[in-house]
Amino acid sequence: VVIPVRFGLPRADGSAEIPLPAAPGASQEEIRRQNLGAVLRYVHVHGPTSRAELTSQLGLNRSTIGALAADLAAGGLVTEETSTTATSTARRAGRPSLVVSPRSGRVYAHALSIEVDRIRAARVGLGGRILDLRETRRPRGMPALEAVGPLAGFVRDMEERADADDAICAGGGVAVSDTTRGGDGTIRLGGADEGVSSALGAELGDAPGFVIGDMADIAGLAEHIRGVAAGINDLVYLHGDLGVSAGIITGGRLVIGHRGRSGKVGHMVVNPDGLRCGCGSRGCWETEIGDAALLRHAGRSHPDTGHAGREPGERATVLEVLRAAARGDSTAAAAVHRVGDWLGFGVANLVNVINPDLVVFGGSLREVYAASAGVVRRRLDGMALPASREHVQLRVAALGRNAALVGAAELAFEQLLADPLNVGVAG
Ligand SMILES: [Zn+2]
C-alpha cells in the first residue's frame, strides 16, 4: 500500500496543498512517520478534529487515518472519542466519526522568553494551551545569560507541579530579544543568545534540549501558526521593542540566515542624515520609528534618560502620546504622523523586496501602526510596486504579549511533530 505523503498545513483558503512525492526509496516506516506527523500537526493547530475531517483535509483514506490516529492514541499523544457534539463533517458522513484531540494536559513543551523588560516561562500543552506561567522583571541592562538562572528555577518549579508520572515533555524553546540597553543608556545589539542554550542545559541536567530563536522570528512564527497570519505562507512580521526586527516567512518557512541573524530590518538605513544608531551606523530605520523617535518628535523627554532600560513609564508615555494624538493634540498628532510616514517608508521597501501577502505589526509597533495606519498606507501606495502593493495586506498582531511563548513552544514541538512516536518521557 502506498500512502501519499503530505507536508505542512492545508492552506486557510481551502485550496489543496500540493502533495510532494515521497523521496525515492522512502521506506514504509518513513512514510508512516510523516503521516503520523501530518495528523498530529493538524489536531495540534486546529484542535479536536473528526476522523472524517482528517480524511478529507489530509487526503489520506479513511482506514489509513484510523490506523494513524490509533497509533497516536496508543502513544499517549491524542485521545479518540465519539463526540456527542459531532462536527458538521461527522454529521454529514451519516454516522458518528471519532474525534481526535491533542492531549494538551499531558504532552507539553517548555516555552521561555527573555524579553526587553521581563523574563517569562510557561508550560504549553500540545494544541497551544498555556498550562502554567511564571514571570519576573528583567532588570535594565541584564545580559540574557543572567536570565538563565531564574528561568531554570521556573522550569524546575513547573515540572514539580506537572503530573510527572504521565507527562511527556517534547522539549523547550527560548525566544530572546537581542536588544538591551546598557548602563549608559545606549542600545546594544546582538550576542544575547550565545550560551543561553548550553547554560540552560547545564542548569537543568538531563531535561530535553532548548531551541533558541530571535524574538521577532518566534513571535512571527506564532502569528503564522495561531494568529493573524494563520494559513498565510508569505509574510513579514515586524516587532518593535527597544529596536525593530522582522520575522520573515516565505513559502511557509522562516528565513533565519546565518546563525539566525536575518531580519534586522531596524538597521536598514533610511535616512543617511539621521541620528546615530546603537549599531554604530546612522539613520537606521529604528532611529525613525522606535518609541524614542516618537517621544522625541512629541517633545516628551525620555523618562529614563541616563538610567537605561525600558521602564513601565516609557511605555506609558508612548501610549499617552498616541492617545493625545487621537484626541487631536497637534504636537502629538504631528509626531505620530512623522513616525507613521517613516514606518510606511520602510514597509514599502520590504514589500518591494520580499513581496509578502501580509505585513503584521507586533510588539510596540502594534499601537504605532494602529494610530498611523492611514499615513503608512499612503506612503506604501506611493512607493511600493503595483504588483506587490495590490495584494499585500497590513494587520496588527493578534496574539499580544503571549506571542513569544506560543512561538517558543511551536519551535519546541517541531521535533515531536516530525517524529511523533519517538519522544522522551519526563519524570
Ligand atoms: Zn542601526
Image: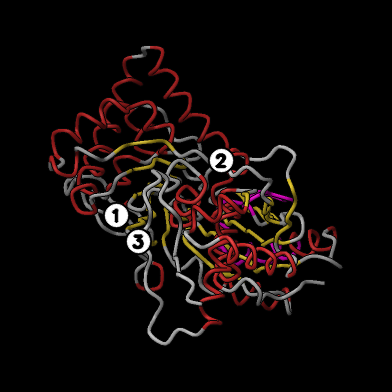
Instruction: Give the Cα separation between the discs numbered 1 and 2.
Output: 23 Å
In the image: residue 258, left or right of residue 2: left
Residue mark closest to the camera, 2 vs 3? 3
Three-letter amino acid code at disc 2?
Glu
Residue 346 found in image quarter:
top left
Residue 372 placement: quadrant = top left
Element class at badge 1:
helix
Residue bearing mark 3: 18
Q: Which mark is residue 267?
A: 1
The reply to whether callout 2 and callout 3 are in contact (CB within 8 Å) is no
Q: Which of 263 and 102 is in front in this view?
A: 102
Please report the residue visible at 74 percent of the width from the left and 62 percent of the height from the top. 155
Ligand 1 under 8 Å from disc 2 Cβ: no
Q: Earlier in the sequence, mark 1 or mark 2?
A: 1
On whether residue 21 falls in the magenta region, the answer is: no
For the residue labelled by badge 3, is the local secondary structure a helix, a strand or a loop? loop
Examine the rendered structure and indicate whether residue 275 appears above or below residue 107. Answer: above
Task: Indicate if the residue with disc 1 has its beta carbon within 8 Å of ligand 1.
Answer: yes
Mark 2, secondary structure of its residue = loop
- Write down which quadrant ligand 1 falls in: bottom left
First of labels 3, 1 by sequence position? 3
The answer to whether any part of residue 188 appears in the image is yes
Magenta residue span: 127-153
Which residue does the image show at 62% across and 67% down from the upper left?
68
Residue type, label 1: His
Between the C-alphas of marks 3 and 1, the distance is 37 Å
Residue 159, how many percent across, how many down?
80, 63
Horizontal and vertical percent for residue 118?
A: 61, 49
- Tell me the distance, in whole angstroms, between the alpha carbons under discs 2 and 3: 48 Å
